[in-house]
Amino acid sequence: MVSSATRVSVPLAFAFTLLLAAPALASPATELGEAYRAYDRNDLATAQQRLASLDDTALVSRDYALWLRGMVALRAGDPTRAQVAFSALGKLGGASRYAAQVPWRLADCAWAKGDRAAAAKQYARLITAPDALTIGDVGTARFRIAE
């Protein structure tokens, strides 16, 4: 005869074993970190995959996710998606450490979409800013203006 204690403890032990064996769900911050690491390795496919499942609203620093979404999309050849991410980042305001980069990245998006005249106009304005050398790629901007 099986005791009532055995009937309770065996299922509990089994459930505990399953819990330990199951992979832990990553937090949004961990997922964002994995996406950044993939981006740094130039593994854009993995970065896109990590970002696809990321809930930006669950992050303390939503701007990091938006910046990374934009950069991955831009480098992957999707300037329209990049523009959406950078525009959303710009709407967060100056509190983001990436706020100053938004106009530069939007100019890059215009360039990548083939709107060279609009991009050149944006670059021409951006390279005259006092902090242009620390924020943007002035050399690339000048090259694109000259083309």
Image (cartoon, helix red, strand yellow):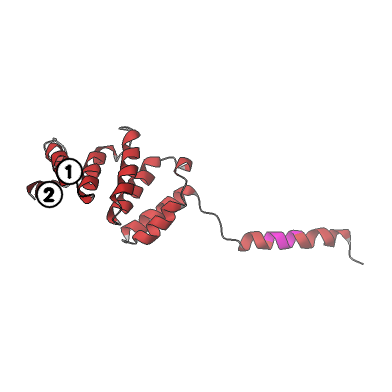
Which quarter of the picture shows residue 12?
Answer: bottom right
Indicate the amino acid at tag 1: Ala
Image coordinates for residue 65, horizontal then vertical, percent: 38, 46
Image coordinates for residue 27, horizontal then vertical, percent: 50, 50
Image coordinates for residue 18, horizontal then vertical, percent: 66, 62
Instruction: Please provide the residue range marked out in magenta.
Output: 12-16
- Residue 119: numbered disc: 1
**Helix, strand or loop status at disc 1:** helix
Image coordinates for residue 87, horizontal then vertical, percent: 31, 39
**As displayed, is residue 119 above or below residue 129?**
below
Residue at x 31% of width, y 61% of height: 42
As drawn, the residue found furthest toward the bottom would be 1
Instruction: Left or right? Give the position of 24 relative to 128.
Output: right
Q: CB under 8 Å between callouts 1 and 2?
A: yes
Residue at x 23% of width, y 49% of height: 113
Secondary structure predominantly adopted by residues drawn in magenta: helix
Q: Quadrant of the N terminus?
A: bottom right
